[in-house]
Image (cartoon, rainbow, N blue to C red):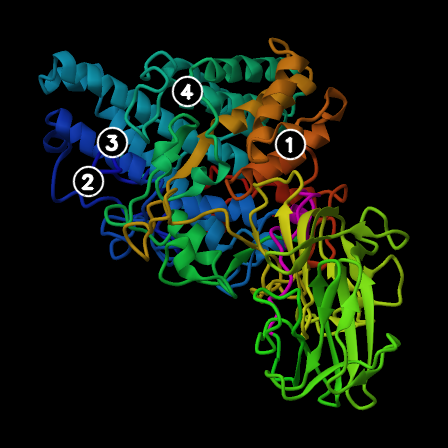
């Protein structure tokens, strides 16, 4: 099975450490009446089960499947799941995501207009501290003294030592989230007693030091990189979190010191040297079997449609992104929730993105049913067959005027018949002047070629014009000044060309002149003489086909080879508007097709409601980009050449393993790295932290649609670089001081 350990919900005597959590959003401890700690922790299996609950704290919302016995109350259980709340805070507040729902204050995230009573912020805050409390309890119960009391020795004791280090990592991770999002927060460790009391508030800079100290302390206590069970923390997970901590240290401490970036590089180097490699296909990182990507994934939050059910996590991420003209089955779900999209600001980070990649012109549907004039002759095989319906002319106007194109060898002779037999045949009057009589002489064609034939049966005249064809227009290499020659394919009866086109327009014309030319008036794949220019939506290499013969004349234009393009630009554009006029309307803003509950082989996940797709909280590409940024910010222990190589590895993979995606050293700037992080990591809970580190989150230096509640974006106060402590907690705990501005 996909999951390497079963998530078992055991009852623990865990009393929340802060008395304030008894109001709108109460933290619900696991029932203390069922089992005592001594029973729960009697052996290694018990410790393993509780450890599973700690990991499940990131992925599930309670103790009874998707809903029914929540860990925190006062909010819909799905909204209260850890990863879903984290996603709201890290993505909806940025240029990467909007949500169309009207649930309470949900839209205030993107407007950057929240307050201390916001129910979603409260849910995230209490979820973080519920997780910390559980970790504290596990750590208390796994001391050497406790293991001695319970007689646990040997290999079991060694394994529980690893469990304890993992619990400390999970606590450090949640304290890191508190540090990043809330700053100055209540602080309790395993050294504080169990029971109700008012925890002291720790300053942000001091919490930074605590998280750093904890991660350094457990570095040697965790299992070596890539040796633990899938989804469990190892040394590489701690290294990655340390690298993130140091990269953002200036924000957390208020100190500008290049030593932070040196430390970031140190721990990036440890991860890079641990044997991880980039997954060859970017999309595979976000599919239902992404547990196979252990070559790149460093630490994941695991989900299973049958065993880890939740209305949060990737169930939320995938379902909420499906709406409009999207087909839910393509994403492995039974239905979409039509909520989340992105802004034009993210789309514009992909300058080569075109919505019409793989574009083809509309498939023609000739009307037919026109009166027919048959053209038997020596060129046919077998020859002189008036009943042959492939060598005919048609009267589109049903007015006795017939037209068509036929390909002749040299010295062809032919006649025209109004019926598919010889009873009504017409030939030349003997003057070779274009006049017909019945039965007349054979019409002679001396030169081989593709001929346009017009016959007027009203006045018994005919005209034959030899043609060669070309493609012309602003989209072609020659513009409107010269034709791109087409080649006739006698097998298909089509004129063909493979040509590099740019966004623009084209037409077909004969003999390098405008006397005979075709366009498309209806955009329906049917050609008309002197018709409208045919639009080409984007640059690429195209196969172009034109079929003349008997009317209706048709054409096909198909993108054959797209230019180098970024495969990470996973936008659904059909029926979607790039610009957002109304956040509530799903069709405003491109949808994101990055996450799917479908495997890399196209098989749907195990359940159509709850997803199998794991969430890669830490992965190698992020580490590569952190390394490059730390080098650019002046850190030691790395070099610009290695940084460029790592960035280019990310880009080459992102462009479908196309070496042309490489950038030059002069292009690798800090702003480029920020944009590259958006291209690589969007919708993976990094963006808010990145924008704050760059000074572009609340300021006017970077605006995106609906930032500040204004369509074109507006500056907001730096207050919003931190979320407020819940007003209920501040009111209940006299030790807490609210964040500035709230």
State the residue position of label 3.
51
Q: Residue at x 52, y 21 (%)?
A: 243
Give x and y (percent) for residue 391: 64, 71
Residue count near mark 4 (Cα–Cα under 10 Å), binned few <14, some 14–19, many ≥20 = many
Q: Residue 342, how many percent across, how many down?
A: 59, 53
Residue projecting furthest to the top: 637
Q: Toward which corner of the image does residue 516 lie, by quadrant?
A: bottom right
SS label for mark 2: loop
The residue carrying mark 1 is 693
Mark 3 closeness class: few <14, some 14–19, many ≥20 residues within 10 Å: many
Q: Is residue 405 visible?
A: yes
Q: Main secondary structure of the magenta part?
A: loop
Residue plotted at (83% across, 67% down): 465
Q: CA distance from mark 3 to mark 2?
A: 9 Å
User: Which residue: 74% across, 26% down?
Assistant: 667
Q: Which residue is mark 2?
A: 8
Gap in Å between the C-alphas at discs 4 and 1?
23 Å
Identify the residue position indicated by label 4 in the image.
236
Give whichever of discs 1 and 2 has the lower sequence position: 2
């Amino acid at each position: 099975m996909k999951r390497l350990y079963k998530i078992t919900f055991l009852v623990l005597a865990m009393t929340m450490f802060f008395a304030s959590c008894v109001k709108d959003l109460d933290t619900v401890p696991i029932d203390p009446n069922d089992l005592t700690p001594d029973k729960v922790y009697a052996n290694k299996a018990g410790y393993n089960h509780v450890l599973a609950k700690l990991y499940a704290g990131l992925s599930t919302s309670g103790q009874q499947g998707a809903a029914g016995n929540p860990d925190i109350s006062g909010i819909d259980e799905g909204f209260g799941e850890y990863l879903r709340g984290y996603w709201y805070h890290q993505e909806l507040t940025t240029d990467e995501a909007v949500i169309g729902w009207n649930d309470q204050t949900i839209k205030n995230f993107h407007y950057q207009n929240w307050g201390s009573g916001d129910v979603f912020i409260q849910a995230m805050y209490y979820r973080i501290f519920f997780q910390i409390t559980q970790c504290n309890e596990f750590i208390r119960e796994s001391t050497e003294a406790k293991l001695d009391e319970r007689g646990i020795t040997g290999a079991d004791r060694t394994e529980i030592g690893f469990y304890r280090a993992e619990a400390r990592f999970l606590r450090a991770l949640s304290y890191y989230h508190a540090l990043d999002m809330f700053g100055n927060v209540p602080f309790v460790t395993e050294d504080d007693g169990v029971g109700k009391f008012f925890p002291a508030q720790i300053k942000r800079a001091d919490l930074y030091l605590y998280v750093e100290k904890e991660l350094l302390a457990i570095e040697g206590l965790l299992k070596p990189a890539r040796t633990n069970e899938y989804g469990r923390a190892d040394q590489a997970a701690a290294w990655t979190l340390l690298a993130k901590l140091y990269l953002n240290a200036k924000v957390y401490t208020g100190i500008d010191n290049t030593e932070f970036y040196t430390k970031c590089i140190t721990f990036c180097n440890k991860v890079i040297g641990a044997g991880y490699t980039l997954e060859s296909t970017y999309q595979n990182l976000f599919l239902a079997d992404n547990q196979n990507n252990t070559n790149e994934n460093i630490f994941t939050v695991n989900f299973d449609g049958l065993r880890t059910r939740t209305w949060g996590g990737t169930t939320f991420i995938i379902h909420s992104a499906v709406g409009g003209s999207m087909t839910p089955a393509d994403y492995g779900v039974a239905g979409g929730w039509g909520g989340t999209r992105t802004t034009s600001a993210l789309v514009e980070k992909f300058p080569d993105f075109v919505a019409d990649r793989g574009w083809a012109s509309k498939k023609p549907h000739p009307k037919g049913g026109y009166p027919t004039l048959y053209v038997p002759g020596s060129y046919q095989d077998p020859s002189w067959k008036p009943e042959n319906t492939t060598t005919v002319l048609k009267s589109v106007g049903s007015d006795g005027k017939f037209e068509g194109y036929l390909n002749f060898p040299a010295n062809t002779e032919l006649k025209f018949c109004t019926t598919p037999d010889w009873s009504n045949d017409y030939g030349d009057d003997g003057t070779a002047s274009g006049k017909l009589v019945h039965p007349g002489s054979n019409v002679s064609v001396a030169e081989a070629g593709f001929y346009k034939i017009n016959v007027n049966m009203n006045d018994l005249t005919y005209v034959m014009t030899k043609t060669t064809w070309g493609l012309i227009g602003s989209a072609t290499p020659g513009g409107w000044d010269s034709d791109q020659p087409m080649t006739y394919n006698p097998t298909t009866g089509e004129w063909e060309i493979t040509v590099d086109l740019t966004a623009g327009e084209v037409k077909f014309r004969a003999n390098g002149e405008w006397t005979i030319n075709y366009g498309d008036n209806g955009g329906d794949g049917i050609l008309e003489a002197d018709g409208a220019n045919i639009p080409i939506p984007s640059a690429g290499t195209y196969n172009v086909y034109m079929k003349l013969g008997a009317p209706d004349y048709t054409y096909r234009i198909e993108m054959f080879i797209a230019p180098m393009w970024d495969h990470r630009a996973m936008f659904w554009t059909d029926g979607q508007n790039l610009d957002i006029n109304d956040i509530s309307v799903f069709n405003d803003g491109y949808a994101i097709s990055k996450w799917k509950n479908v495997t890399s082989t196209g098989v749907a996940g195990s359940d159509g409601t709850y997803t199998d797709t794991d969430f890669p909280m830490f992965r190698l590409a992020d580490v590569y980009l952190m390394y490059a940024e730390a080098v650019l910010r002046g850190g030691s222990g790395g070099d610009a050449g290695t940084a460029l190589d790592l960035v280019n590895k990310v880009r080459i993979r992102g462009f479908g393993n196309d070496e042309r995606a490489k950038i030059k050293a002069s292009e690798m700037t800090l702003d480029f790295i920020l944009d590259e992080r958006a291209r690589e990591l969007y919708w993976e809970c990094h963006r808010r932290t990145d924008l704050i580190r760059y000074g572009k989150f609340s300021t006017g230096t970077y605006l995106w649609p609906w930032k500040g509640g204004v369509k074109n974006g507006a500056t907001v106060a730096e207050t919003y670089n931190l979320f407020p402590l819940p007003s209920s907690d501040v009111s209940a705990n006299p030790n807490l001081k609210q964040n500035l501005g709230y």
